[in-house]
Amino acid sequence: MQIEKIIKKTAAIVLSAAVCGIFGAAGYYSLRLPESVTVSSDGSVGFAMYPELRCDRETADAGISPGKTTLSLFGAIPVKSVSVHREEAPTLIAGGRPFGVKLLMEGVMVTATGNVDCPGDDVCPAEIAGVEVGDVIRLADGVKLSSNADLQQVISDSAGKDVTLSLTRGSAELKACLRPVYSESAKTWRGGMWVRDSIAGIGTMTFINKDTGGFAGLGHPVCDTDTGEIIPIQSGEAVPVEITGARKGAVGKPGELRGRFTRSPFLGVLERNCESGIYGRLSDEALSELAEGAGEFRLGYRQEIKTGSAEIYTTVNGSVPRSYTAEIESIDYNGSETTKNMVIHITDPDLISETGGIVQGMSGSPIIQDGRLIGAVTHVFVSDPTRGYAIFAENMLEGDMPQ
């Protein structure tokens, strides 16, 4: 009798632990899964990383609410209700080719402020007016600014009278009243601030839409080196680049690609600079040249990505990309970081030998897995240059791709 009680008690404990384990696992999946997914019209709603999660195709098409489906653990325990958007995955030309970035800002960005040497005590008119580092000044006394010279001309012409500045700080539009002071050393009127009106650098194309000539690159925004702010662009050019070598990355010291802008005709115009990358449109000639012999891949949606082997296309010499082996180590399906959706590990001995792993200038290098273009390299880990972050290609496609 006593033995029977012990057996029943043990069975109850085991059953309780099993139930807790199952529902604990369900909670884990719920936190890991996104609120919505995009799926091809003839595709099933499922995650390559979690084959144990299932959903009925009919449920996906005509579930409790339109465009919703419920994923279940082993088809038995509901885990999460997910919005489903059905759209054909486009076929894209894989990039990997370096390009030069030349940007003219929309306005001028304040990168520093400081005192002006003037009669009496030195003062900083910009600080007194409430101007801050990172502000983008678009108008000065109604004059549209496109260069440092434009702003200095308005300040010089003021002869010390108040200058009204129209500026942007984050998403806020503000006004500031700047009263210039006379600089004894420069013999002119100054505002006590340094501004930047343009920027240039090297990045890597991620993919090209062969039907429209639109392209995306970098996988992260172009930011000002002093302020860290995303640069608002008025106009820009993508120009040809030849990579001449690389400074190898090491622990604590990120490397970089070294190259030069060539005299070849420009590749196209740059139209947008946003959180998920830089976007532009190729000229007809450049599109024809870059499309010839280039690999074409179907876009891979986030739920189709899994940990394991992959390859990246990048250029570390000349101007023609080649493929290198890599591993997807982790995937954040539901993260808030737009540009840090995956952790990627470079495994190719040739690439590690040449660059040490991921280096500056490789941002935007496309990642291919199972014949799909799934993402792009975005950041390197300072503590380990063979590892870094990557963005979903899906996020880049949604980030203002030119139509």
Image: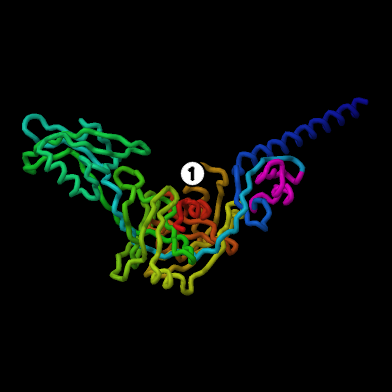
Question: Looking at the picture, which amino acid does disc 1 mark?
Answer: Glu
Residue furthest out toward the bottom:
293
Q: Nearer the viewer, residue 213 or 144?
A: 144
Mark 1, residue position = 337
The figure's colour scheme reads: rainbow
Dot 1 falls on a residue whose secondary structure is loop
Q: In which quarter of the image is the N terminus?
A: top right
Asked if residue 74 is among those painted magenta in the image, a careful observer would answer: yes
Residue 49 in the image: x percent, y percent? 64, 51
Q: Which residue is drawn at 27% across and 36% down?
A: 132
Which residue: 49% across, 62% down?
Answer: 312
Give the residues in magenta.
Answer: 48-75
Q: In this view, does 49 lie to the left or right of 178?
A: right
Q: Residue furthest front?
A: 142
In the image: residue 390, left or right of residue 78 = left
Label 1 crowding class (10 Å Cα cut-off): few <14, some 14-19, many 20+? few
Relative to 2, is 36 above or below? below
Q: Is residue 9 visible?
A: yes
Question: How many numbered badges does the structure rendering display?
Answer: 1
Q: Is residue 358 visible?
A: no
Q: Is residue 201 above or below residue 129?
A: below
Q: Quadrant of residue 64?
A: top right
- Whether the magenta-drawn stretch holds residue 3 is answered as no
Q: Position of residue 341 (x, y in %)?
A: 52, 48
The residue nearer to you, when weighing 173 against 45, is 173
- 13 versus 291 height, above or below: above
Residue furthest out toward the right? 1
- Toward the viewer: 116 or 348? 116
Q: Measured along the vertical axis of the image, is residue 323 above or below residue 145?
A: below
Q: Nearer the viewer, residue 250 or 271?
A: 271
Expressed as whole percent of the image width and height from the top left, the position of residue 36 reads 60, 45
